[in-house]
Image (cartoon, rainbow, N blue to C red):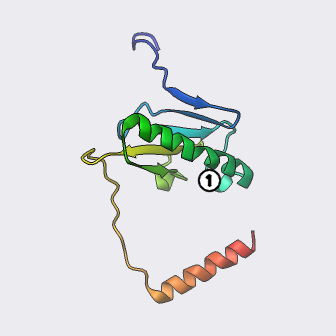
Amino acid sequence: RPGVGPPIHAGVYEDDVVLAFLDIGPLVEGHLLVIPKRHYATVMETPDAALGAVAERLPRLARALLAATSAKACHVLANNGEEAQQSIRHLHYHLLPRRHGDHFAIPWNTGKLEPAGAAKLAAGIRKNLASQ
C-alpha cells in the first residue's frame, strides 16, 4: 500500500505443506501463525492426513520460537468457527510464546461437570463418533 512504508518480511518457515509467519497484530511478542498451504476453513473440515502433516511441524516451530524469544512456555491455539473467534476462514494455528509478566490472559472461567449431564453428553459424542 502506498504511503505505509516498506513491507515487513515476517515469514519464518515454508515447506510444501505449511507457511509460518509473524502475526501483524500480535497478542504477545513473537506471536506466530502456522497455516496449511491448501485451503481448509477449520480443523473439522481438514482431512486427517493434512491435519497430521501440519501438526507434525508444530513442535519444531514452537521450539524455534521459544528459543528465539527466550520464553519457557507457549500456547498452541486454533480458533474454529465464528463463535470461537475465528476471523479468517482459513485454518491457522497461533503459537504464543509466554513469559511471566507479559500481561496476556485467556479467561478460564471453569464450570462444574454434573454426572447426569456428563453421561448424556459422553453418550452423544460416542454415538456421533460411531457414525463417522
- Residue drawn at (51%, 51%) of the image: 79
Q: Is residue 98 left or right of residue 80?
A: left
Which residue is at the far bottom?
116
| Quarter occupied by the C terminus | bottom right
Q: Circle 1: is it few (<14), some (14-19), or many (20+) Cα within 10 Å?
A: some
Q: Give the SS element for disc 1.
A: helix
Q: Where is residue 18 in the image (x, y as percent from the top left)?
A: 64, 37
Residue at 56% in and 80% down: 121
Identify which residue, 8 or 79, lies in the foreground: 8
Q: Residue at x 66, y 36 (%)?
A: 37
Q: Can residue 88 be seen in this view?
A: no
Is residue 130 positioned above or below 25 on the image?
Answer: below
Q: Please name whichever residue, 66 or 30, is drawn nearer the observer in this view of the structure.
A: 66
On the image, which quarter does residue 92 sit in? top right
Q: Residue at x 66, y 32 (%)?
A: 15
Q: Residue 19's x, y, as percent?
A: 60, 33
Disc 1: which residue: 43
Residue 3, picture quadrant: top left
> Could you say which is closer to the camera, residue 130 or residue 66?
66
Residue type pointed to by label 1: Val
Residue 4 sits in quarter: top left
As drawn, is 46 to the left or to the right of 64? right
Quick check: 77 above or below 116? above
Task: Name the spot of residue 27 as percent of width and height, x first.
Answer: 36, 41
